[in-house]
């Protein structure tokens, strides 16, 4: 997902917080820890995530990678 993807504008700050919680949970299994990740500000209708002010699309892309990795681990077991 690109930062300019229009679908990203549909996510509210609360929804992004829920996605961050899921990232924390799924990432932990892979040793990925984001202790300070939180929502930041809204810019041009997009909620920013505080990974050094990354767009929410970064969060979506990280979650996609973790979903894929989790699925591959499940298939390989």
Image (cartoon, helix red, strand yellow):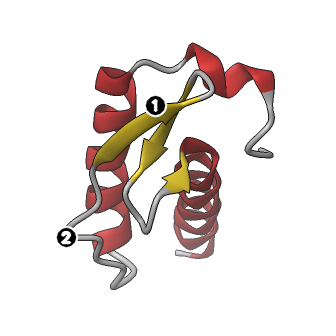
Place of residue 22 in the rendered image (x, y in percent of width and height, measured from the top left) = 33, 47
**Mark 2 nearby-residue class (10 Å; few <14, some 14–19, many ≥20):** few
Q: Which of these two is toward me, 21 or 35?
A: 35
Determine the residue positioned at 28% across, 73% down.
28
Q: Quadrant of the N terminus?
A: top right
Residue under pointer 1:
42
Find numbered disc 1 in the image and state the secondary structure of the residue it sits on: strand
Find numbered disc 2 in the image and state the secondary structure of the residue it sits on: loop
Marked residue nearer the N-terminal end (1 or 2) = 2
Residue under pointer 2:
35
Quadrant hosting residue 4 = top right
Report how far apart the C-alphas of labels 1 and 2 lie in the structure: 21 Å
Query: Is 62 situated above or below 76?
Result: above
Determine the residue positioned at 54% across, 63% down.
66
Q: In the visual, does 13 lie left or right of 43?
A: left
Quadrant hosting residue 51 = bottom left
Determine the residue positioned at 36% across, 60% down.
26
């Amino acid at each position: 997902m690109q930062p300019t993807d229009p679908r990203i504008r549909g996510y509210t700050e609360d929804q992004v917080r829920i996605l961050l919680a899921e990232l924390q949970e799924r990432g932990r299994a892979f040793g990925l820890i984001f202790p300070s990740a939180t929502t930041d500000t809204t810019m041009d209708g997009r909620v920013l995530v505080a990974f050094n002010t990354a767009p929410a699309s970064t969060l979506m892309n990280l979650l996609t990678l973790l979903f894929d990795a989790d699925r591959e681990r499940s298939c390989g077991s």
